[in-house]
Amino acid sequence: MKSITGYQLNAELKKALFLTVTLSACFILLSFITDISLGYSLFLSTFFSFSITALVLKKSFERYINVLQGILNSINGAVVVKNYDGDIIYSNDIAKANLTAESNNTTNSIAQNKKIMDDHEEGKKYKIKYNRYHKAKELSLKVPFKGMDEKLKIFEFNREIKDISFLKNTSHLEKIFEISEEGLWEWNKVTNEVFHNKQWSIITGVTTSENTFSEFISCIFEDDIAIVTSAINDMLEHGKIYNVKFRVKKASGEITWVWDRGRIAEYDQDGKPMYIVGIILDITTEKRNQLEVERLAYSDPLTGLANRTQLETMLEDVISSRKNEHYYHAVLFIDLNKFKMLNDSYGHHIGDKLLKLFSDRILDCIPKQHIFSRLGGDEFIIIYPRVEQKEKEALSVALDYSKNIIEKTSTPFLLTNDLNKETIDYDVSISIGGIVFNSQEVTPGYILQLADIAMYKSKSEGNYEPKIFSLSRHEELTQSNTLALEIKSSLKEGNFCIYLQPKVDRNGTTLGAEALVRWHHPTRGLLSPADFLEQAEENNLIIEIGQTVLEKACEMLQKWQSHAAFSELTIAVNLSARQIWQKDFIDKIMHTINSHGINTKKLTLEVTESILIEDIKGTIEKLNYLKSLGISISLDDFGTGYSSLNYLHQFPIDEIKIDKSFVSDITSNKNTAIITRSIIGLAQSFNLNIVAEGVENKEELSFLSQHGVSIFQGYYFSRPLSIEHFEHKLNKREHLVGTST
């Protein structure tokens, strides 16, 4: 279907054609009635025909151009046509009134248009855009084309829209933005205004005003302002993507975690950011979940202190920090003494209460910049950074610091049993070992290992004095650790054996023996317990050593049961505290006895008074069970421990052993003699067997025999013997009185 303008143009052309034909006929006729040549007549005819047509067409095009100009001027927007160099070829009235050559021929604008023209495709329009949150919104259309001269040009249409309903009528995006759970925003850098949807206000707590950007900055949580402003500056100055997570504090006091992202949407004619657009999300729930995961990963769930993973990270920071390189630092290893006794006596819930109260008390007495961590169980670590710049002073300060902690924690802890509302006034003692260092060549694991060894040295001495070492003494500390590794290796290789020290009557007749551990060291030869037992205790290897001794003692009893000369002999085995405290202690004893098929009446288990003090309830139950199997229980080192009289009537004891410290003085010290006679009388009153150990001469034997002792051990009779040597003497039926070889 043709346009109206098309019909009008055809009519004008028909008129021009009619006049041209008529005029041509007149000139031809004129050539016949005059002497004008036919060729000249045709020339005149053609000339006037084209002139008339041109005049007609010019008049028509002027009319149509005026119509088109009127249409373009009536458009509510600026229409501009530019050439490739940015020169304005055409502009309508609105464009002339609002757009100047200076404002439209900036380097930025020319470059943008050239890029569109260079990339142009025939008939393709280049992006319609509008800035959603300006007060004055702009609709822009750019179309590149080639003119009749085949040169690239660009058509621009720009419209300022003050009525938002125009956009709403043309798109449903606004409605989508309003119901979105994301906060959408645009920051006018020139006016400093922030335009946004409703969700943005809900998330940030910032209400619409004339200066909302300043309000937005003021609502950021104080500790996070620096990271937000830094991210904004990086975007504005370096064009980086704005991407930051931070906290905002609402007027109600509520703290919200948000994730804010944005980028520069438009630059001004000088290349400076004008508009920044972005999106903000409420990530409070996700952040809380993340923090909880991190807390579980890096914190001790009971006390809230840093756990081992976090501790090693923080210790690594202390070691590697250059600002600390001229300072000595201290790492202190703390262990609660007799903690297991509390757990076993009152339950783990009481033990947990003590650990929390202990942690709180430590936190109250150390500076906040010091790092306090729980490794697990009853073991804690303190990192004391930047103690002093000289080693000697650092050692002294760390020692005083440790003593202060011991003093602060020595006050009894009041513990309430939630099950029966019983109140326990519990005394706590702690062992502290520490290492002072300033080297950056060490690892956190190595420092913790040395501090652990130092703590065990403090614990083994039993005087609750802290032990602080410098890194220069690491060989002294690691020597015991090396020994522990050798003990482990020898246990696997079966290098531990037993020697037997005879137990005899007053005539020297052998009644049995005490099994004493010996170590066939790969390079140092045969070692006695004095050479390795302390390290075994410190490194918890005493349990495996004790089990080895029990196994070998039962092997001997099994062997002796089939020989008449040995079938009546008994063997005594020492039990360590750590063995008895094991949950599977009874199971291991039963398995060993049953696997060897021994007569339990020939087995005696020796315990010390200190073991009885450590775990009263548990020890009573276990010893009663063992005694019900026919096993004899002997109380070793009687009189050297705690309240011996208090325990004689509580425990299922068959025998007491008078410690050699009494025996060695009975002939030279009146008081010792009196005490020894009292011990003997007391044991007799309870119908207990009495063994005197450490008998080394005839006078001691005579005194003890006169006062009722019937079983003896000591060098006067025999040193500990290898199994072969022991059996050899028995086969020869040798009496051992006065033969200590």
Image (cartoon, rainbow, N blue to C red):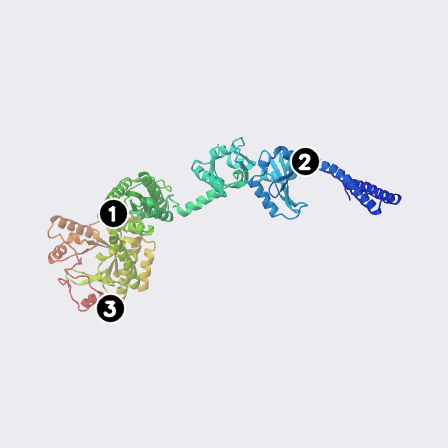
What is the distance, in whole Å, between disc 2 and disc 1 at their CAs?
A: 92 Å
Residue 110 visible in the snapshot: yes
Residue 536 position by quadrant: bottom left
Q: Which residue bears the numbered disc 2?
A: 75
Q: Nearer the viewer, residue 498 or 541?
A: 541
Q: Nearer the viewer, residue 486 or 724?
A: 486
Mark 1 or mark 3: whose residue is earlier in sequence? 1
- Which residue is at the far right? 33
Q: How busy is the neighbourhood of tag 1: few (under 14 within 10 Å), some, or many (20 plus)?
A: many
Disc 1 residue type (three-letter):
Lys
The local secondary structure at tag 3 comes to loop
Q: Amino acid at mark 3?
A: His
Check if mark 1's residue and mark 3's residue have beta carbons within 8 Å: no
Residue bearing mark 1:
467
Amino acid type at image mark 2:
Ile
Dot 2: element: loop
**Whole-number angstrom distance, CA of label 2 to CA of label 3:** 126 Å
